[in-house]
Every structure is written in C-alpha cells, then in structure tokens.
Image (spheres, coloured by chain):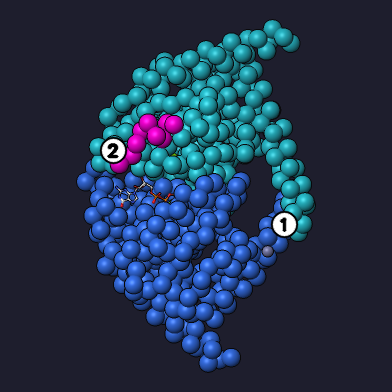
Chain colours: A blue, B cyan
Amino acid sequence: MSQQRLIQIETDILGKNNSHADRNRSVFSKNGILALNLVSSPGSGKTTLLVETLKRLSGKAPASVIEGDQQTSNDADRIRKTGAAAVQINTGKGCHLDAHMVGHALEKLPLDPGSILFIENVGNLVCPAGFDLGEAVRVVILSVTEGEDKPLKYPDIFASADLVILNKTDLLPHLDFNVEQAIAHAKRVNRKIEVIQMSAKTCEGFDDWLGWLEDARERQALRDCQTKAAE
Amino acid sequence: MSQQRLIQIETDILGKNNSHADRNRSVFSKNGILALNLVSSPGSGKTTLLVETLKRLSGKAPASVIEGDQQTSNDADRIRKTGAAAVQINTGKGCHLDAHMVGHALEKLPLDPGSILFIENVGNLVCPAGFDLGEAVRVVILSVTEGEDKPLKYPDIFASADLVILNKTDLLPHLDFNVEQAIAHAKRVNRKIEVIQMSAKTCEGFDDWLGWLEDARERQALRDCQTKAAE
Ligand SMILES: Nc1nc2c(ncn2[C@@H]2O[C@H](COP(=O)(O)OP(=O)(O)OP(=O)(O)O)[C@@H](O)[C@H]2O)c(=O)[nH]1
Ligand SMILES: Nc1nc2c(ncn2[C@@H]2O[C@H](COP(=O)(O)OP(=O)(O)OP(=O)(O)O)[C@@H](O)[C@H]2O)c(=O)[nH]1
Ligand SMILES: [Mg+2]
Ligand SMILES: [Mg+2]
Ligand SMILES: [Zn+2]
Ligand SMILES: [Zn+2]
C-alpha cells in the first residue's frame, strides 16, 4: 500500500473519531459533566489513584468511571467497590480508547448533572495521544519509577495534556529520579502543562488534586453556561 | 470505512511485515547472529538492563543494538558509551518498530558472525505484540512497580514472548508486589514462558540472564548449522 493511501486512511479514522468526540462533548456539556481522560504507561497507578479519589469525592460530588483495558474487568471491579458506577471497555487487540467506544459506554452510565466522569485509557504512552474522546481535561500520570526522560521520549502525549500527575512519590527515597528535571522536560514539550506530585500510599498531593478538580469543574460549569447563553 | 476493509488493510500491513521479518531472519541466520526483541512498558528498565549486559559481554561476545523510540537518540547514546555499536530509529507518531525499519537499521551495523543483536522496541505493552521483527527470541521486561496483573491485562505481548524478565527487584521491599502471583499470571497466558528476576541496581539475576543468553546463542548456532546442512 502506498504511503499516501495510508495517510488518507489515518485521516479518515481521525476525522471520524473527532466527530464522535464532538458528540460526546455536547453530551457532557448538556448534562454539566466534567470529563477527564487519564493516560499513562501501564501500571503508573491510574486505577489506584481513581479509587482513592472516588473515596474522597464520595458524598461531595457524584462521579463515574469508564475503564479501558485490552482484557479483564479487574479495574472496573476495583472502581465499583467504592460505590461509583463503572463501565469496562475491553479493546482486545486495540491499543487505545476511541470516541465511538466512549459514546456507547455513556449509554450505560447515569450521567448525573454536575458529576465528574473519569475515563481511564488503556495503559499506553503513545497511541491514545491522537484520539480525542471529547474530554475537557487530559491528565498524564507519570510514575517516578519510569525515569525523568519520558516527556522527551514520548512527547505527543505530554504535548496534548493539561496536567501531569507525578505519581508514586513515596518511592523517591529509593530512586535516583530527579523531580525538577522531569518537570522541566514536561514543560519543554508543553509550556502550559501543570504538575501535581502525588502518592496513593502516603496521600501526598490529594489536597492539590481535589482542589484542581474543583477548579476544573467550576471552569466547566462556566463554559456550559456560556454555551447555553449563546444558543 | 467498513470493518471488513479495515481488517483487509491490517492483514496487508501484517503480511508485508512478515515478509520483511523473514528477510531479516535469513540475514541473522546467514551471519550466525542471535537477535532478541525487547518489549515492555515505557521505563521498565530496558536500556539500563542493556547497558549492564553489554558491559558484562564486553570481550566475550560481540554485540550491537537497535534502539526504537518515538523521539530522541538518548538511548542509543547511552548504549554507545559501552563501546557497542547502536543505531537509533525514531518512530515519530509510530507506536512500535516494524521489520522494514529493522531491515534498514541492519545496513548500518557490523553484523559480526556469532554476535548478539539486541533490538529495544518502543516502550509499549500493546502494539509491538503483532509485529515480528525476525528475532529468534522475544523478551518482555516487566518492572515490579507495574503490578502483578499486567500479564492478564495485556496478554498478547506475554503470549508472544519466550522470556519475562521481572525487573527492579531491588524495589520489592518497598512494594506490595506478589512475585509468585505475577509469575502465575504470566504462565496462565503462556504456559511455556520462562522467568528471570533481575535488578540493575543490586545485580541480582545477571548470572541467570547471561547463562540464558549463552544457551540461546548455542541453540541458534545449532539451528543455523541445520539450515545450512539442509540447503
Ligand atoms: N508505591 C506506590 N505504588 C503505587 C502507587 N499507586 C499505585 N501503586 C502500585 O502500582 C501498581 C499499578 O497500579 P494500578 O493502579 O493498577 O496502575 P494502572 O495505571 O491503573 O495500571 P493499568 O490500568 O494496567 O495500566 C500496583 O501494584 C499499585 O499498588 C503509589 O502511589 N505508590
Ligand atoms: N530501582 C531500579 N531502577 C531501575 C532499574 N533499572 C532501571 N531503573 C530505572 O528505571 C528508569 C527507566 O530506565 P530505562 O532503562 O531508561 O527504561 P527503558 O525501559 O529503557 O525506558 P524507555 O526506553 O523510555 O521505554 C530509570 O530511572 C532507571 O534508572 C532497577 O533494576 N532498579
Ligand atoms: Mg488501571
Ligand atoms: Mg530505553
Ligand atoms: Zn455505534
Ligand atoms: Zn498503537
């Protein structure tokens, strides 16, 4: 197959994805939902972070979760134990979620007004970068065990994100990880990216993260309000 | 685009890759080279492991390296410091190496008879699974920081591998990682898979790994000899 034909196919796939993403975005907007897309390497701590976050949100803000994985419903099972609604998407051979899959998962979720929807993507620092799911916010979780060079070596995903969570900071005393350098690398590929340092073990950073979420919800509510006023 | 058309395109791409892989394999066979494809999540320790391995092979077995990364030549630079020849492939948006890229990289390497060629794939636990590079041996590196569920959640790559290196064992005292369970999970998706536990920090497991490599070289030499006899 010619290179040109391959590029055409890719453009078609991304174009289709973008129209599904726009549809999801308008569902979120209509229902006043803040949607976050969580991306990272396998095992950086996405599900653990979500479980701890949902416990802290319980009774304060309604939240639900879409879990993306190649196989198993392990992560959705872990989420449901917190009482939150969760839908598992198994991608099989697929290496990332796309907006069409998310659209169908939305049909199975309560979509409470004012709620937060966390979408945990397949653990993959490459392929999810190009696929808008309709989210308002994209968060990259980088475990300090992965090394401070990841933003330079996998730049697309950091370039497309709003926030980096530097995770597993409890392990820092046992590693040579240079926090300042990791942050500098992330800012080099994305000048505007924000950073929160966290640990699910020591609970470091949860106040910052919950505050960040609250601010994002307020920004989202303001945007939704302006959209309605403009209609 | 129809689902059928997409499957057709994928079949074409994989078919083309397989013919390039066969070509690489015959280059390896003709030159008596043992080729290994190293796959893992980003930051599981592939390059660190290679650097330590090359230091120990120095003067004993000639070795060279192909480095796959989305961006930067950092990893090839780290390898060259050991004195080994290294070629960097930058995949850009690409999420895995393919056999065609490897074929071109081979043109730039010495290909010493009886040598070992390490191919470090892009850090990605999903997409490299389907792409044969012509290697004799596929090794998955799983860092103990990633959790013991990875073989079940990302089964294709474990199913396609010959060996799992359980890496960063020096961190075990600081984690809840269950080694036996991780091994059981890997064996559940691939009954024949072998396992070596290693740490680049404490040097645990290097004797096992170097012994394993030596055995693989001998098996490869025997196969090459039989191939020649059959011709
Ligand atoms: N030390 C430490 N370990 C953590 C932390 N957060 C998660 N872990 C561990 O990291 C491993 C992976 O955690 P998960 O939450 O399953 O990671 P994930 O990103 O959801 O993994 P995938 O969905 O498979 O990509 C598990 O063994 C967790 O116990 C942390 O803050 N500190
Ligand atoms: N504690 C500990 N850290 C390790 C070990 N091996 C590697 N690391 C650290 O893990 C991080 C990633 O190591 P790399 O060797 O760059 O990993 P990689 O798999 O080549 O990464 P990519 O090529 O980007 O996918 C670095 O900070 C290393 O210092 C180990 O055995 N123990
Ligand atoms: Mg998870
Ligand atoms: Mg590397
Ligand atoms: Zn549909
Ligand atoms: Zn991919």
Q: In the displayed image of the protein, which residue is found farthest to the top?
A: B229
- Using a 10 Å C-alpha cutoff, classify the residue at mark 2 as few (fewer than 14 neighbours), some (14 to 19) or many (20 or more): some
Amino acid type at image mark 1: Ile
Residue B138 lies, in percent from the top left, at 53, 29
Residue B183 magenta: yes
Magenta part, dominant SS? helix
Judge the density around disc 1: few (<14), some (14-19), many (≥20) Cα neighbours within 10 Å.
some
Judging from the image, mark 2 belongs to the subunit labelled B
Quadrant that contains the C terminus of chain A: bottom right
Q: Identify the residue under disc 1.
A: A9
Horizontal and vertical percent position of residue B151: 48, 38
In the image, is A130 to the left or to the right of A183? Answer: right
Q: Residue at x 41, y 53 (%)?
A: A78
Judge whether B98 appears above or below A151 on screen: above
Give the residue at mark 2. Answer: B171
Nearer the viewer's eye, disc 2 or disc 1? 2
Q: Is residue B67 visible?
A: no
Task: Report the front residue among B143 and A12.
Answer: B143
Distance in Å between CA atoms under marks 2 and 1? 44 Å
Residue B28: which numbered mark, if any?
A: none
Left or right for A176, reference B93: left
For ligand 2, tell me if the residue under mark 2 lies within 8 Å: yes
Spot occupied by residue B177 in the image (x, y as percentages of width and height): 33, 39
Contact, CB < 8 Å: mark 2 with mark 1? no
Mark 2 lies on a secondary structure that is: helix
* Residue nearest the observer in this picture, B148 or B200: B148
Q: Chain of mark 1?
A: A
- The residues colored magenta run B176-184
**Secondary element type, mark 1:** helix
